[in-house]
Image (cartoon, rainbow, N blue to C red):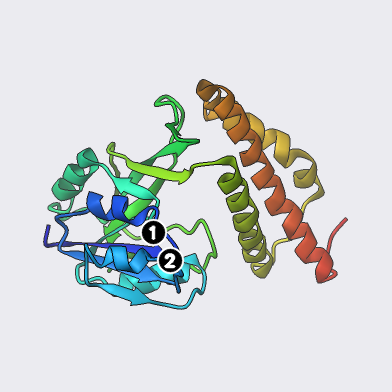
Amino acid sequence: MNNISVFLVVKNEAHNIERVLNSVKGFDDIVVVDSDSTDNTMELAAHYTDRLYNHEWQGMAVQKEYAKSLCKHDWVLNLDADEELTEELKQQIIDLVRKQDVAGANIPIQEFFLGLPVHSSAKKNSHIRLFRQSLGGFGTERFHETASVEGNIVDLSGVINHYGEVSLEVKVRKANLYSSGKAIDKYEKGKRSSSLKLLFVFPVMFLKSYFIRRNFLNGWRGFIGSVINAFYAFLKEAKLYEQNLINKDTRD
């Protein structure tokens, strides 16, 4: 696959890196950008590619934009270290990049939670992970960054497997870390906390996660995950309130 570049942003991912790199064998350009790992992430990555770089952490979107800029080809595919490209999706990608009227693709993410796949009938998140770098890029978000692409975006059915939430400790830690970054992003854009959101964001987001996104199909895993998802939404609003309070511009 000589017309597609794969790029990853990593740090201390020795426990994941071989799985994702195994899944993209056959791509001739694989870029891995590290942020001062203290484990053997890059030693393992060196078995799969020589396109290894270190870049000081400046936020996820900035890191990904830097990694993208190192890619040789116009078509780029972004994966995270705790993900895996499926064979079905790989073939769909090969077919798609031959088309001239497409700028990118929305790809569904198959989540694995507590070691098991989320029910196939639960709603999947989809993200633009494949696109022409000449037509798209990332913003400045610290976490949960998304690519913005100009042009025709198609939906693919093949999935990326995501193994990031291997334990409740990891899921809660991510919720705490990401909510801090999102709150600062919002504050820097001039957003203010809302009393109504502080009151209602938790129950509303729980209902959305558990019923609308059909996480009830996952049994107790779905209930627990939905509670944490709702708490993550609450934390974002509470930490935005905290930012407003620190800077003395809260609206009661």
Secondary element at tag 1: loop
Amino acid, disc 2? Asp
**Relative vertical location of residue 169 with respect to residue 74 in this rendering, above or below:** above
Q: Nearer the viewer, residue 64 or 176?
A: 176
Which residue, given by chain and number where applicable, does mark 2 sit on?
39
Which residue, given by chain and number where applicable, does mark 1 sit on?
14
Q: State which quarter of the image contains the C terminus.
A: bottom right
* Residue 208 appears anywhere in the view: no
Image quadrant assignment for residue 157: top left
Q: Nearer the viewer, residue 105 or 118?
A: 118
Total numbered circles? 2
- The CA distance from mark 1 to mark 2 is 7 Å
Within-10-Å neighbours for mark 1: few <14, some 14–19, many 20+: some
Task: Give the number of the disc on residue 182.
Answer: none
Q: Nearer the viewer, residue 130 or 235?
A: 235
For the residues bearing labels 1 and 2, Cβ distance under 8 angstroms = yes
Left or right: 138 as drawn, with respect to 181: left
Q: Could you say where residue 36 lies in the image, as x and y percent from the top left?
A: 45, 74
Which residue is pictured at 53% across the width and 64% down the height?
141
Q: State which quarter of the image contains the N terminus.
A: bottom left
Left or right: 147 as drawn, with respect to 113: left
Q: Could you say where residue 26 lies in the image, as x and y percent from the top left?
A: 14, 55
**Relative vertical location of residue 49 with respect to residue 200 in this rendering, above or below:** below
Image quadrant assignment for residue 18: bottom left
Amino acid, disc 1? Ala
Q: Nearer the viewer, residue 152 or 176?
A: 176
Secondary element at tag 2: loop
Which residue is pictured at 81% across the width and 71% down the height?
247
